[in-house]
Amino acid sequence: MLLNLVNSFLQLVEQFSISTKIIAATTIIAVFVRLITSKRFKLPPGPRPLPLLGNILELHGASLLDKLDEWKERYGPVVTFYIGPKMVIVVNDFEHLNEAYVKQGSDFSSRPLLYSSKIVTDDFKDIALAPYGDVWKYQRKITSQALRRYLTGKQLELRVYETLQPIIENMKQESGAFNPHRYMSLSVFNVLHGLCFGSTLQIEDPRFTKLLSSQDKVSDGIGNGFIEDFLPPLRLWPTKKFTELMKLALEFNDYVLDRLQEHKISFDANNVDDLTDNILLAQQQALKEDDFAKFFTDDHAKQIVIDVFAAGLDTSRQTLDWLFLVLVAYPEVQSKMHEEIDRVVGNAVPSKEHRSRLVFTEAVLMETMRLYYVTPVGLPHETMRDTTVGGYEVPGKTTMLANYFSMMRDPKYWPEPLRFKPERFITINKEGTESKISALRHDGWAPFSMGHRACIGESLAKLELVYIVAGLLQKLTFSFAGEEEGKFPDMGNSAKGITFLPKPYYVKVTSRGN
Ligand code: HEM
């Protein structure tokens, strides 16, 4: 098998034009010169890399997560491996992640400048994939402020409620078994569409259908990432996967650009409502201050909105896909949530006032994110200078991965890690009433990451998900369409590399008559 792979690689090189061979040869020479001249580091241990190919052959055809688990077993909590000539260090436990991303945050908070990221971000003018620096700091600050403003009022809870009513009616009218994925996606899509653009789409709107299908294909197809990011010569003949997924991602960007243009035409600084208006207002103010004007071109404004929309959409809707699978597989969990929601919310609009008392509901959400974590290695970081972790040396410009997936299933932090047990997040206080443990203080729970680059949408995501789940369960009971009730279906190998998504499943709903 190894020989076959090497042969196919050589055949591929055979087909390269002379200019590509020159580029490839120059890259090889540059790598060797770098190896010879570079400082020797006491790196974390890891599998032995091949020259130029690194550990690509071991990763080829395997799930990245399975490989990372295998290497964690063999080499420990911090592991070095190579994708092509590019060195990657992966951190597998909470203590070392805390040491790197939090205690030494200023060393570990940049991003690798990947070729694929450059294409979809107009040359890193966004937040999520941009390198650490003044532009990123500025964009992150104004976006966080806009999100905070949005969350202080009642806009989010009303938006979720308004979004859910037609979805609930549509679900009730489903005559047989259906896949809830479209509905989960639409509920999150509309919450974010409302936040970003002040409007929502109907489920039959062709724009929603098209965007959903593109986003599904991107999440499904991304696998272990793009080889073009690590072997530059291959960019001259990009793989079909790369070309197709880039095209779909850019279509999503175009949709946001159209909305941004509409907002620019109707913009009124005295009537700022949604996130796009807030960003346009911040842009107007920045343009008055010379120092910031260069940070805020139209491309920057577009990329901020894309980030909020895209980063929030997939993570939240896929979390809901898992959560509703849990609810149909464990009807006793669903009943307990029904009881809590009836008691705390009744027929009212689920709101902030209810949230602190929706203890079990929130614990189910946290347990779902722990066990069925949709972005197993999050977004890569890059070191900004030579530094250390776990007593090992880490050179500057090293790509870092955090293995949240493995950490959140590690028996070191979680007794019976593979058991779905929301109660692990709940404590009983002295008065005998339940109170929730803060997730931030639970070692090993970090679905939103930690440190400077931690998710800026954490508060929004948690609120939105609680409101959606409470709003749906207020009115509906979900069950499996077939015989599966009471057991979690075999999801096979759902971990596709950098995403972890459930396979399609089918449910039926019954109205709760309220
Ligand atoms: C269940 C929902 C969500 C999960 C699990 C999640 C998870 C994450 C993770 C793991 C990161 C990478 C952190 C790092 O690199 O250390 C991240 C970054 C980010 N998330 Fe989220 N996220 C969620 C929802 C959202 C929402 C609703 C928004 C919208 C505001 C959002 C916006 C972002 C942005 C802009 C970044 C980049 C931050 C930066 O690089 O400075 N996320 N998220």
Image (cartoon, rainbow, N blue to C red):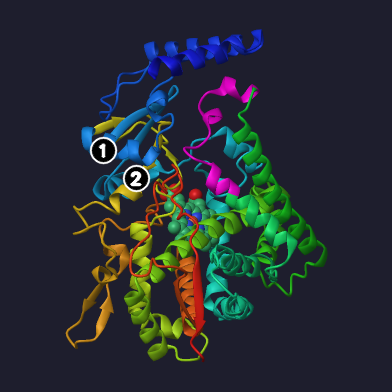
In this image, 85 relative to 291: left or right? Answer: left
In this image, 288 relative to 64: left or right? Answer: right
Image disc number at residue 403 = 2
List the single residue furthest toward the left.
430
Q: Relative to 100, is 58 above or below?
A: above
Residue 196's x, y, as percent?
65, 65
Query: What amino acid does circle 2 point to?
Result: Asn
Residues tagged 1 and 2 counted as in contact (Cβ below 8 A): yes
The residue stretch that appears in magenta? 217-236
Residue 407's x, y, as percent?
29, 50
Classed neighbour count for the residue bearing mark 2: other residues with Cα under 10 Å, few (<14), some (14–19), many (≥20): many
Secondary element at image label 1? helix
Residue 294's x, y, as percent?
67, 46
**What residue is at 78 percent from the left and 58 percent from the top?**
261
In this image, 147 relative to 498: left or right? Answer: right
Q: Is 244 in the magenta?
A: no
Which residue lies under the disc numbered 1? 72
Q: Quadrant of residue 243?
A: top right
Residue 365's x, y, as percent?
38, 68
